Every structure is written in C-alpha cells, then in structure tokens.
Amino acid sequence: MSKIFGFTGNDDFCPGGSIYSNPKEPSLFLSLGNHVDVYFPSRKRSRISAPFVFIEERSQKKKKASIDVLPDECIFEIFRRLPGEGRSTCASVSRRWLMLLSNIRREELCCGKTALSSKSEEDITEKKGEVQDIESEGYLSRSLEGKKATDVRLAAIAVGTASRGGLGKLVIRGSNSGCGVTDGGLKAIACGCPSLRVLSLWNLTSVGDEGLCEIADGCHLLEKLDLSQCPAISDKALFAIAKNCPNLTELTMESCSNIGNSGLQAVGRSCPNLKRISINNCPLVGDQGIASLVAATSYVLTKVKLQALNISDVSLAVIGHYGKAITDLVLTSLPNVGERGFWIMGNGQGLQKLKSITITSCQGVTDMGLEAAGKGCPNLKHFCLRKCVSVSDNGLVSFVKSAGSLESLQLEECHRITQFGFFGSLLNCGKKLKAVSLVYCLGIKDLNVGLSQLSLCESLRSLCIRNCPGFGNSSLAVLGKLCPQLHHLDFSGLEGITDAGLHSLLESCKAGLTKVNLSGCVNLTDKVVSAMAESHGWTLEMINLEGCRQISDASLVTIADNCHLLSDLDVSRCTITDFGVSALARANHLNLQILSMSGCSLISDKSLPALGIMGQTLVGLNLQHCKAISNSTVDRLVEELWRCDILS
C-alpha cells in the first residue's frame, strides 16, 4: 500500500513531482472526500463528474442575469411591442413593470409585423381597427375609496381595462393617507384609458394641475367631471379640460379653493355641450365666472346649482335673462344676493322652460321676489322653499296664484307662514297641484279659520305635514273639506291631533288612502286606526304607526281582517303582544313584505311560529330592541327565513 503513495516518475498524477511534501498525510487524502471520482490512467488527466464549488458560483452569477438589468427605456420598447394580453400578464410581475406598462399610450403601441408577422398588411389594419373600437367602448366602471385609492391600483386599472372594453367611469374617494393618489396615478389612467367619460375626484389633496392636465391630454371623450375637496387643482387644469375635452356636458365643483372665474370662463367658451353645472363653496368664484358661463351656454345649459358662493344680484340677473334652456335651478346659501336679484331674475323673461326651483337659506327671498318668480316661470311645476324667514303668507299666496302649472309645493322651516297662508295656497292653486309638504313650520297654529265658501282642491293627492307642533284637529277638519281626493297622508310628529280630528279627515277622503304615516302621533288610539282599516282597507298599502304608544293588538286584528293589499307595516314602539302577531299570521289574504316591530318589549319567543308563517312573503323584518326575544329564536328565524333581511 505504501508503494501506491510512494511512486514517482512518468506515471505521476502530477508530472514533475508530487504537489504535497508528504503524500501520505491522511488529512490530505481524506479531504477529497466524496467530492471527486479520480481515475489514474497513464499520462491522463482526471475526470470530474461532480461540480466543484467554483462551478456553483459561476451558475449563480448566470441566474442573476435577467431582463431587469436593462434600463427602463429598453424595457419600454419591448413592452410596447407586446399584444394586449401579454402586457396584462407582464404587469403582474413587478411594480416596476406595472408602472412602465401604465405609461404606454395607445399611439405608442406597435401592432405591426413584429407582433403579427404571419398576417398580411390588410389583416393588421383590420386588427388595429378592432382594438380601437373595443377601447372606445368605455363601458367599464371602477371605484376606489379610502386606503384602496393608490397610484398602484390606478396603474393596474389602466393596464387591465385596456383589453376589456376600456374604462368609462372612474370614481376616486381618497383618505389623505401617505400613499394616496397623486398626479402619477392620473397619468397612468390618461395613458391607458382614452375612452374615459366620467371622472370623479373627492378629497385628494395630492392631486394637482399636472394630473388633471394629463387626463385632458389623454381622455378627449370626457363628458362628466366631478371635483370635490381638491385644493391643489387650479384654473390651469380647467384650461386644459376646456381645450381638449369639447364633449364635456357636466361640471361639478365643491370646496376647490384655487378654482376661480378664469377656469369657468374657459369652460364656457370651449365646451358648447355643457348641460349641467354644480358649484359649491368655491371662494374664488364670483359673478364674472358664473355670468360668463351661463351666457356662453344659454341654449344648452339645463341644470344649475349654486351654493355658498360670493355672487351677487348680477349672477341671478344673468340667469333670469340668459337661462333659456334651464329646467332645474337650485340656489342655496347666497348671502350677498338680495331682494333685487330675485326680482330681476323673475322678470328677466328668460326662464320660460324652468320646471323646478329650490331655494334654501337665502335671506334675500321676499314676498316681492317670490311673486316675480311665479310670474316669470310659467311652466314651473316643482317649488321648494327652505329656511327662508322673510317669506310671509302674502308672498306664498301670490306665488301660487301666479304659478298656474305648479304640481308640487314644499315648505320647510318657513316660520312666517301661518294657517292663513297654507289654506290660502290650497284655495288659490290651479287644477294641477298634486302634492303639498309642510315641514317644521312653527308659525302654523291651530286656529278656527272660518272659511265659509270653500273651493275644493280636488287635484291634491299627497299631503305631508310633519313636525308642526301647532297643527291640530281644527286644521284636519278643514283639510278634509278642501282635499277630498287624497291618497297619501304623512302626519309624522303631530302630537296635537287626536282620534276626533283624524276621523273627520278620513270620512272626507273619498278616493281611498294608499299610504298613511302616523309615526309620533302619540294621542291616537286603536279606535281611529280600526276605523281607517275598515273604511280604506281595500286600498291601503302602507301603514306607519311607529311611536303610537296607545296602539295595541286591537289595531292589528282589524288590519289583518280588512287590509288585503297591505305590504308595509310599522308598529315599532307600540304596545302590541304575541297575540297581535298571531292575528297577522292567521290572515290568509295578507301578503306583508316589510314588518317592523322595533322596541316592542311585549313580543316574545312565542311569536316564532307566526313569524315563520309570515316569512313566506316577508323580505324585511325589524326586531331590534325586542328584549323578550332570545338570541336562539333570532338564529332560527335567520336560518328559516333565508330570503328575508332581519334586523335584531
């Protein structure tokens, strides 16, 4: 064995001598271990079948080489030559690839021989046309809210929707977080979504003119723009929108502190199809912007909403003269507009097509201005007046006389309106008035009006009197004589009415009531509810008795026997028991869809079988604050009534 380690000469493993000073050293021999398989032919080099360590290092270096070592410019050139599906697949590899793909514009895509080398020139042209047609569809809609509103998600939307018909509507509601939407996200949408038609940006402090200018440059089909709480957006962005988006039909701005008159003027000059504007709490917007915009779009602008602006009588004068196509007008919180402005608007003779007007918290509205509005708007059908304390009975009656086409009248928190103005409006209205609503008007007092000759208001179908503490039985008796064709009644919160007053009204209603809301009428009892069910049972569809503490099982029994069409019943916080619920379940003809018994402490687990029977038709059941009903009963109801939404 020693000869094997001691040989020298021409047959050495290393010709010229041993490489080790002591070839017999065991550690040197054993260090080869299992790493190599050595064979010693004469004058032959050893064969190595297993990899050495230096080979592993070399392979690792080779693995690190990839497309990512290329600069963005090269990868961009590769991506723009890929087909649509290929681009979408690559977008899921890394954030870098996603952002690169999202910045490729449609005109930068290559769909030529490189991607479709087997097709003829005619086929390629046809394919291009099909892709453009699909992207111009724009029927997809996306909405991002809160923490989900980021640039990365917008980039993914831009890449993903391009091959699926194109993005048509985008709504972004930010949260002002550190990773929220910036101009870069809007740039991705501008590049990848040329078919965008509706854009809504809410609460985005990091989005400025640059992002919206990118949208203007890339999305020429934009029709609706909604900007809310975007302080970094200024007139510069509106200039770009006006220049590049001639199809704009709707503009909404709220709490945009850097947008002023110049931007609105540009939109008015360059957007001939603008039909709707809504401007709220923009401090830089004044008469110059509103007047220019309305005058430039006088024949197409149909809906105008102005709220909390520093405008004066001049703006209303321009609206009254140039608003030839306006059909809906909303004016809210305009402190600098006085009586003269409303008077000029009504006498401007330009609001001939106006059908609906809502005025809220405008102290400049007086009797004279209201009468002028009635005369200057011959086609007015819907009128709503809220929190206007300067309007009195004389102004209201004069307005109703002038507005011969009026169909709906709504008064809310107008405290100078009294019983005389209310009944005077009903007596002097035309034959088209169908609905009257009186909400929280403290000037209403239950007086004996003493109307000797009554002119019936037979056109009135809906009457709503809510939270007017002075309204009582005497007023109900007069209403019954004035309005015999009522279908809908809403007397919510009228604590002053009793059975006698409501009964007199029910006797006068000849057409048959369909919807009755008596919530909060604490002085009503089972007697009048039973009378209503017996006389109007064949027409009643909805009854609301919430908070009527004197209503008990007797009312439910009568309702079950007489109301064949009833679908919605609310007896929350009434004194009903399990017996009343059973009475409802025994009525075979009753097909209730919504039943609310919130706060009925006398209903217990015994009502489970009855609720199970009614569950065949119920789609909504409210059992909140029913303390006598156990959780196990609620769980069984949830399991059995799988078609019904249960609140507990």
Image (tube, grey):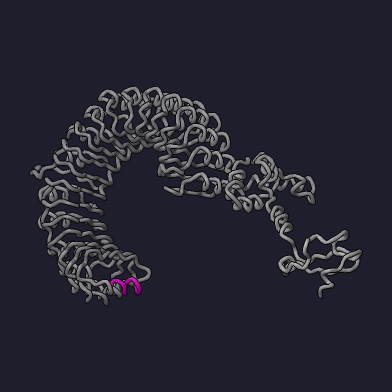
Number of numbered discs present? 0
Residue at 35% over, 74% down: 640
Q: Quadrant of residue 6?
A: bottom right
- Residue 227 image offset from top left, x and y in percent: 43, 37
- Residue 412 image offset from top left, x and y in percent: 22, 41
Q: Is residue 87 above or below residue 364?
A: below
User: Can residue 373 be found in the magenta stretch?
Assistant: no
Residue at 37% over, 34% down: 255
User: Can residue 637 be found in the magenta stretch?
Assistant: yes
- Residue 349 image offset from top left, x and y in percent: 35, 26
Whether residue 137 is visible: no
- Residue 575 image offset from top left, x and y in percent: 15, 66
Q: Is residue 364 left or right of residue 182?
A: left
Q: Which one is in front, 556 or 635?
A: 635
Q: Quadrant of the N terminus?
A: bottom right
Q: Which one is in front, 494 or 182?
A: 182
Q: Which one is in front, 338 or 207?
A: 207
Whether residue 37 is visible: yes
Q: Is residue 59 above or below residue 297?
A: below
Q: Which residues are magenta?
A: 634-640
Which secondary structure class fits the magenta region best?
A: helix
Q: Quadrant of the C terminus?
A: bottom left
Residue at 41% over, 35% down: 253
Q: Quadrant of residue 431?
A: top left
